[in-house]
């Protein structure tokens, strides 16, 4: 496969995943701001920080008002990570690799762009926000369904899976990290009822609330939740699950092409680090340090994949 085609597939799925992740973040912020209106500005600030767009937002706005945050994250073209920006980038990449996609996948990606462009042609009213966020999630699911249901399990599918998993891991890791360094007003709140409410918000932002309760029978402690989001191999947005998807699909590429690349060594190292930790050792090491290292390693894996498979050639 040409490197440019591999890169187009990889980034198409990364951008689509980013659309959905941003919608989930906004939904979590909207939910908690409604229930704790006395601290709504800090909640919206945490959403912007988690999305990784704080410098751009603060260059444009003075405070963290819900209307401004939602508009910047959903439909501001000056924000390269806004939903409308990433949906357009996903479509651009899909057009570039059109011949590598089934008709169903292309139509799902194209419909995603056209639908989101229409519903976000003007600022989204607060009363319409839940429906708009649901529409973003729905179209993301339609693309995934078309991909899983119609694409051959070959190198095209592998690069798509790798892009999705790397983006998903990055999102979950940043949500966990921001929780301790933005959401909590003081270290003295760790383990308090306030701390538990904020952990519950994080579970909702990655659609993990019900799954966690099924497995833990309501024992909502910071240790249990961190363990679930980092190490539980059953949860599809955990760091361990996402890392395994990257590892498996890189192995498929190695078998198809007949050789391994430096990126294979990087993912092996990441997988070994996750296997050699339990949640107690992670907290002893420091949650922030562990997550910071994971984000750095995840970025390095992505960059190495781009280099190894010559995405720019």
Image (spheres, rainbow, N blue to C red):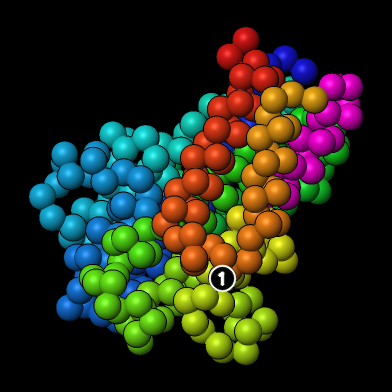
Which residue reaches farthest top?
A: 313
Which residue matches tag 1? 280
* Vertical order, 175 against 224 (above or below): above
Question: On the image, which quarter does residue 81 sit in?
Answer: top left
Q: Nearer the viewer, residue 113 or 67?
A: 67
Find residue 285 and report its horizontal and vertical position in percent. Answer: 49, 60
Q: Main secondary structure of the magenta part?
A: helix
For the point 23% across and 70% down, the residue is 185
Find residue 148 and report its horizontal and vertical position in percent. Answer: 77, 48
Q: Is residue 88 left or right of residue 263?
A: left
* Vertical order, 248 against 50 (above or below): above
The quarter of the image holding the N terminus is top right
Q: Nearer the viewer, residue 43 or 84?
A: 43
* Vertical order, 86 against 41 (above or below): above
Find residue 100 and report its horizontal and vertical position in percent. Answer: 75, 26
For the point 56% across and 89% down, the residue is 218
Q: Is residue 58 left or right of residue 246?
A: left
Residue 225 inside the magenta-drawn segment:
no
Residue 247 inside the magenta-drawn segment:
yes
Q: Tell me the element at label 1.
A: helix
| Viewer can see residue 245 | yes
The stretch of residues the image draws in magenta is: 242-259
Q: Is residue 127 left or right of residue 277?
A: left
Q: Nearer the viewer, residue 8 or 184?
A: 184
Q: Residues within 10 Å of mark 1 (few under 14, many from 20)?
A: few
Q: Nearer the viewer, residue 196 or 202?
A: 196
For the point 29% across and 61% down, the residue is 182
For the point 71% across and 33% down, the residue is 265
Find residue 60 and report its horizontal and vertical position in percent. Answer: 16, 41
* Vertical order, 36 against 128 (above or below): below
Question: On the image, which quarter does residue 307 sit in?
Answer: top right
The quarter of the image holding the C terminus is top right
């Amino acid at each position: 496969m040409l490197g440019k085609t591999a890169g187009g597939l990889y980034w198409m799925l990364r951008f689509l995943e980013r659309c959905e992740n941003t919608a989930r973040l906004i939904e979590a912020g909207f939910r908690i701001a409604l229930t704790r209106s006395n601290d709504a500005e800090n909640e919206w600030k945490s959403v912007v920080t988690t999305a990784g767009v704080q410098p751009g937002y603060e260059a444009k706005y003075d405070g963290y008002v819900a209307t401004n945050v939602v508009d910047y994250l959903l439909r501001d073209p000056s924000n390269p990570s806004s939903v409308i920006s990433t949906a357009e980038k996903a479509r651009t990449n899909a057009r570039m690799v059109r011949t590598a996609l089934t008709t169903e996948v292309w139509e799902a990606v194209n419909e995603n762009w056209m639908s989101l462009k229409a519903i976000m042609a003007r600022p989204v009213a607060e009363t319409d926000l839940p429906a708009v966020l649901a529409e973003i999630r729905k179209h993301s699911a339609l693309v995934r369904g078309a991909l899983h249901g119609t694409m051959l399990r070959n190198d095209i599918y592998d690069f798509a899976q790798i892009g999705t998993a790397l983006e998903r891991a990055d999102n979950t890791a940043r949500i966990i990290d921001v929780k301790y360094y933005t959401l909590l007003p003081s270290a003295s709140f760790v383990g308090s009822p306030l701390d538990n409410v904020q952990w519950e918000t994080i579970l909702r932002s990655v659609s993990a609330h019900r799954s966690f309760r099924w497995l833990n029978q309501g024992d909502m402690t910071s240790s249990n939740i961190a363990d679930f989001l980092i190490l539980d191999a059953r949860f599809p947005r955990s760091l361990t699950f996402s890392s395994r998807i990257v590892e498996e699909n890189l192995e498929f590429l190695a078998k198809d092409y007949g050789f391994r690349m430096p990126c294979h060594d990087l993912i092996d190292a990441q997988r070994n680090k996750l296997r050699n930790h339990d949640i107690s050792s992670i907290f002893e090491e420091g949650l922030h340090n562990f997550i910071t290292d994971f984000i750095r390693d995840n970025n390095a894996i992505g960059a190495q994949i781009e280099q190894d498979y010559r995405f720019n050639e």
